Amino acid sequence: MHLDQGVDLIGDIHGCAASLRLLLERLGYKEQSGVYRHSSRRVIFVGDLLDRGPRIRETVAIVRTMVDAGQAEVVMGNHEYNYLCYRTPSLERPDRFLRDHTPRNQRIVQQTLDQYANHPADERDLLNWILDIPLLIEYDNLRVVHACWHKPLIKRLLTEVSADARVDMDFVHRSTVHESFEYLVMDRLLRGTHMRLPNNEVMISKDGFKRSFFRTKFWSREPEKLIDVVFQPDPLPEHIAMEPLTAANLAQLQHYDSSERALFIGHFWCEGAPTPVAPNIACLDYSAVKYGKLVAYRFDGEATIDQGKFVWVDVDQEFPRDGAAG
């Protein structure tokens, strides 16, 4: 398919609806009859509408009305998938859910649970809508996925499961079987590639969780050490960062070549001034709900990401009540 108009790609919102409204207005969209519209452009949202923020239902409503009116598209984020699994009973054990109700998992979804608690019909509608969101979007000169463009998995998904990258509830149930094809699709596309810390080490991330894996780039060229492939807000401890990549490490890595079409992702909690992560890749997640920036990129068909085309709202300065501590 060919894009016949300019597209504005918007990063992870996490319930920061006031910031989203300001960003849309900054991009030239006007609310008309309850729908944000632009005279010559439309939006693609990169996922993670839910969790953590103060205005999740409002965020979903803004995005859905735009999608329904043909003014926007959206791809599924890991937070939409996680919430669907958290609220879906297991077929094998109806007293359990596809995503375990552990304290950690509940902490992540608590704001969404709270904000839909008195709106059960809206929540059922939300869960049905999540299932209809594609995992990726692809045009002749543009690709969008929440976390990682994993070429082998995407090729199999599009040829064997769904040409429009949508999945059904059977697929979602099978995705909870560790290392199944369905599990790998949801894990890699929505959470990204990762690598185990060497020597069974564990690090404490900024959000207070113990982690034995770290997130990795899928665009590194000729990496030699672990520091060359790490891509996350939490730096690796120095003695780990300088460890050489083994042959097994290198075999795990995916590579999105600089000759491929422009790719837009979210998910990775970037910080500082928005900038391309590779000549043809932009990450649009700049931690809006943690008092960072809600970021957009104005795409007009270019093969190389132009730093001057990032647009953002500084949540801390412009809408501090949109942020969420904890």
Image (cartoon, rainbow, N blue to C red):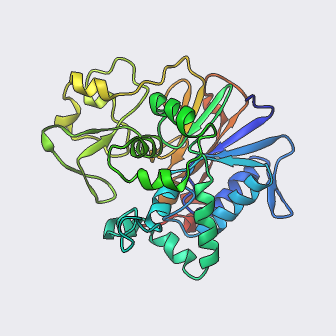
Quarter occupied by the C terminus = bottom left
Residue 225: image location, x then y, percent? 25, 25
Quadrant assignment, res 64: bottom right
| Residue at x 59%, y 58% (from the top left corner) | 130
Residue 47: image x %, image y %?
57, 50
Can residue 194 be seen in the rendering of this structure? yes
Residue 76 is situated, as x and y percent measured from the top left of the image, at 56, 50
Q: Quadrant of the N terminus?
A: top right
- Dividing the picture into quadrants, the one containing residue 253 is top left
Q: In the image shown, does 177 or 304 lie closer to the viewer?
A: 177
- Residue 146 percent location from the top left of the image: 52, 43
In the rendered view, does 174 fall on the left or right side of 264?
left
Q: Residue at x 45, y 28 (%)?
A: 152
Looking at the image, the residue that sits furthest to the bottom is 118
Q: Residue at x 56, y 32 (%)?
A: 159
Front residue of 53 and 131: 131
Residue 202 relative to residue 293: left or right: left
- Res 245 seen here: no
